[in-house]
Image: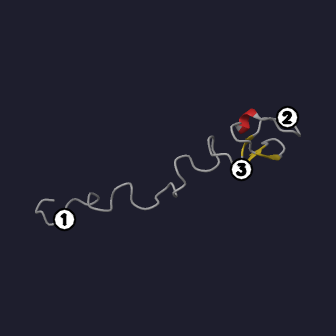
Amino acid sequence: MPFGNGTGPSGQGPGSGRGKGMGQGGGKGRLGGNRAGAGPAGECVCPGCGEKIPHQAGVPCYNMTCPKCGSKMVRG
């Protein structure tokens, strides 16, 4: 602020920082929805046949096998 009147180089005034508004993240929290550590709710999905089973708290989906085809499950 060269003259102390609130003006200055563009992009450096109030409201130009990173914490303003929802931005890219959309307010989903640190990890978001369908990723590892996404919480106890949801389901595990087989990438091979599409079979869906309820997610079990404390058991990562990638450690579970599909009851239909035997593939490793992913978080859905």
* Residue at horizontal 39 percent and vertical 60 percent from the top: 20
| Number of the front mark, 1 or 3 | 3
* Residue at horizontal 77 percent and vertical 35 percent from the top: 64
Label ID, residue 7: 1
Q: Position of residue 51 (x, y in %)?
A: 83, 46
Coloration mode: secondary structure
Three-letter residue code for mark 1: Thr
Label ID, residue 35: none
Q: Mark 3 sits on what residue?
A: 42
Q: Mark 2 sits on what residue?
A: 70
> Within 10 angstroms of label 3, few (less than 14), some, or many (20 or more) residues?
some
Q: Secondary structure at mark 2?
A: loop
Task: Decide which of tag 1 and tag 2 comes sooner along the chain.
Answer: 1
Q: Quadrant of the N terminus?
A: bottom left
Q: Is residue 46 above or below residue 4?
A: above
* Residue at horizontal 80 percent and vertical 46 percent from the top: 53
Q: Secondary structure at mark 1?
A: loop
> Within 10 angstroms of label 1, few (less than 14), some, or many (20 or more) residues?
few
* Residue at horizontal 68 percent and vertical 37 percent from the top: 58
Task: Decide which of tag 1 and tag 3 comes sooner along the chain.
Answer: 1
CA separation, marks 1 and 3? 50 Å
Three-letter residue code for mark 2: Gly
Left or right placement of residue 21 versus residue 4 in this view: right
Number of numbered discs overlaid on the protein picture: 3
Q: Position of residue 24 (x, y in %)?
A: 49, 56
Task: Decide which of tag 2 and tag 3 comes sooner along the chain.
Answer: 3
| Number of the front mark, 1 or 2 | 2
Q: In front here: 20 or 41?
A: 41
Q: Position of residue 8 (x, y in %)?
A: 19, 61
Left or right placement of residue 54 versus residue 22 in this view: right
CA separation, marks 1 and 2? 65 Å
